[in-house]
Amino acid sequence: MVRSFPATLAFAVAGATMFTGLGNPASAQGSLFSATPVEQANFILVAAPIGKGESSQLNIYEQRTNKRPCFAVSGSEPAVVDPLLATFDFTGVCNRYIDGNGYSLRIGGDDFGTRYRLSVVKSNQDVELLAVPTRDPSQPTMVVAKAGGAGGGFLQLQLEPGWLLMRRQYGTRSLGHLYVFREVWPGNEAEPVQSEGNPVGEGTLPADAPVAPELTPAAPES
């Protein structure tokens, strides 16, 4: 079960985000938290039906121990998920992240939890997980994951290239909150450089070749 962080910390986060605007999406604005890696194979993203099943929302299941399976997957494009953790007391065995209290969007050093929502959108061709701006509609909507085909019920969502899961961290303390994470905004990836007579990725780059800017740690919000 996802645990909430202390009320004093939550108040600090709320205060910090009040003074943070979205601005240029490619410019990092910093975060009170950092992000730490997780074992990707222990997690699964799921489009979980809500209401009468016409709509879905993002669920993330985590297999913490091998005591018993937390979920089962069958088929492909789309793959169907059986949420086994709903059939037993999964305390200590599984974690389930079911809404914005359990996960949020993060790009580089910037936490976008209050400025973007993660929404599951269905069509006749696919089921997609989108990152949708909540404050400024002029900001980009991003495709984060896809099921690979249309369908109903619990469906597995596969992250698009460049996206992965990270865990929120405060100082040295890992928290019960996940980031759907990307190092840079889509379209801002460094382009490969090709010199004459030298295939891309082989040999030495010329001295004047452009270099991708380094990500610098963001200062804590005040």
Image (cartoon, grey):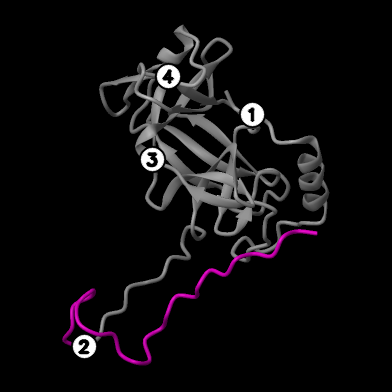
> Badge 4 local density, few (<14 within 10 Å), some, or many (20+)?
many
Q: Position of residue 35 (x, y in %)?
A: 55, 51
The type of residue carrying mark 2 is Glu
Q: Is residue 53 left or right of residue 193?
A: right
Above or below, 202 against 170 in this view is below
Q: Find the distance from the CA under tag 3 to the CA under tag 2.
A: 39 Å
Which residues are the magenta region?
A: 197-222
Above or below, 215 against 47 in this view is below
**Which numbered marker is on residue 145?**
none
> Badge 3 local density, few (<14 within 10 Å), some, or many (20+)?
few
Report the residue marked by disc 1. 3
- Choose the circle earlier in sequence order: 4 or 1: 1
> Badge 2 local density, few (<14 within 10 Å), some, or many (20+)?
few
| Image quadrant where residue 174 sits | top right
The type of residue carrying mark 4 is Phe
Residue appearing at x 20%, y 82% in the figure: 203
Badges 1 and 2: C-beta atoms under 8 Å apart?
no
**Which numbered marker is on residue 154?**
4
Report the residue marked by disc 3. 40
Q: Is residue 104 left or right of residue 160?
A: right
Residue sticking out furthest to the front: 172
Q: Nearer the viewer, residue 193 or 214?
A: 214
Residue appearing at x 39%, y 25% in the figure: 65
Q: Main secondary structure of the magenta part?
A: loop
